[in-house]
Amino acid sequence: MDFGSFTFDQRLSEIASRVDDGDVLVGYSMGGRLALRAALRRPPKFGALVLVGASPGIEDAGERLARKRADEELADWIEQHSIEDFAERWEAQPIFATQPPELVDAQRAGRLSYDPRKLAQLLRSGGQGTFEPVWDELERIECPVLAVAGELDTKYADTAYRIAERVKHGRARLVRGAGHAPQLERPGEFADLLLDFLDKHLG
């Protein structure tokens, strides 16, 4: 889903207005945080939920505050630099080290299409440190949940299994040889996991 807004609440409203009852919602990274909170706002609405490299939140208050401050500093930096500078800095993050150069190059045009001011706004409103964790609310989600992570992305791999343990109808799957973006790094393997999940739960 493409968004026309750059605050967290506005994006949740867009999801609610553009997704029909019984639809499957798939979210990656920040999109996974959006999908998770959309499902918690209206637990009966979705037919299934797929979370890719996503977390219900940072549980430690000190770590959460540190992340919020780091995101604020990054947002300030983004506002003072060009979109080209942002793309270069974003692509240099260790979390993307598993992506081959040709994959990084293929994504660059999309990154260069954004307005740095709106990216900074989104980071301030939807960064990991902005929200209280929702781990204790996961049991309210009624629909089947598939939590996916790349096996090389160990932090989110552990998170995927924790999510699957807490929701009522959850399963976790890892994509071999992939990092934080398994749907991009190993699209065939990711598609197989997704289709198997959908076939089992939605026929």
Image (spheres, rainbow, N blue to C red):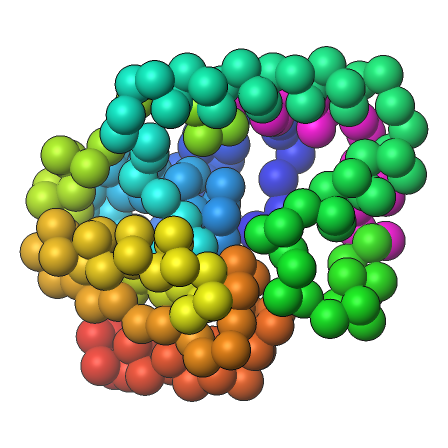
Q: Quadrant of residue 135?
A: top left
165 versus 152 height, above or below: above
- What is the total number of numbered labels drawn onto the structure image? 0
Residue 128 rendering spot, x and y as whole percentages: 45, 30
41 versus 28 height, above or below: above
Q: Quadrant of residue 161?
A: bottom left
Residue at the (77%, 23%) spot, across then down: 78
As rendered, which of 96 and 44 lies closer to the eye? Answer: 96
Residue 194 rendering spot, x and y as whole percentages: 39, 75
As rendered, which of 19 and 142 lies closer to the eye? Answer: 142
159 versus 6 height, above or below: below
Q: Main secondary structure of the magenta part?
A: helix
Residue 87 rendering spot, x and y as whole percentages: 81, 42
On screen, residue 29 versus residue 163, left or right, reads: right
Q: In this view of the protein, can residue 102 be seen by the observer?
A: yes
On screen, residue 103 versus residue 31, left or right, reads: right
Q: In this view of the protein, can residue 18 be seen by the observer?
A: no
Q: Quadrant of residue 172?
A: bottom left
Residue 81 rendering spot, x and y as whole percentages: 88, 23
Residue at the (32%, 83%) spot, across then down: 196
Q: Work out which quarter of the rendered image holds the C terminus and state it.
A: bottom left
Residue at the (28%, 25%) spot, across then down: 60
Span of residues in magenta: 109-126
Q: Is residue 131 magenta?
A: no
On screen, residue 112 versus residue 91, left or right, reads: right
Residue at the (26%, 29%) spot, across then down: 59
Q: Is residue 110 magenta?
A: yes
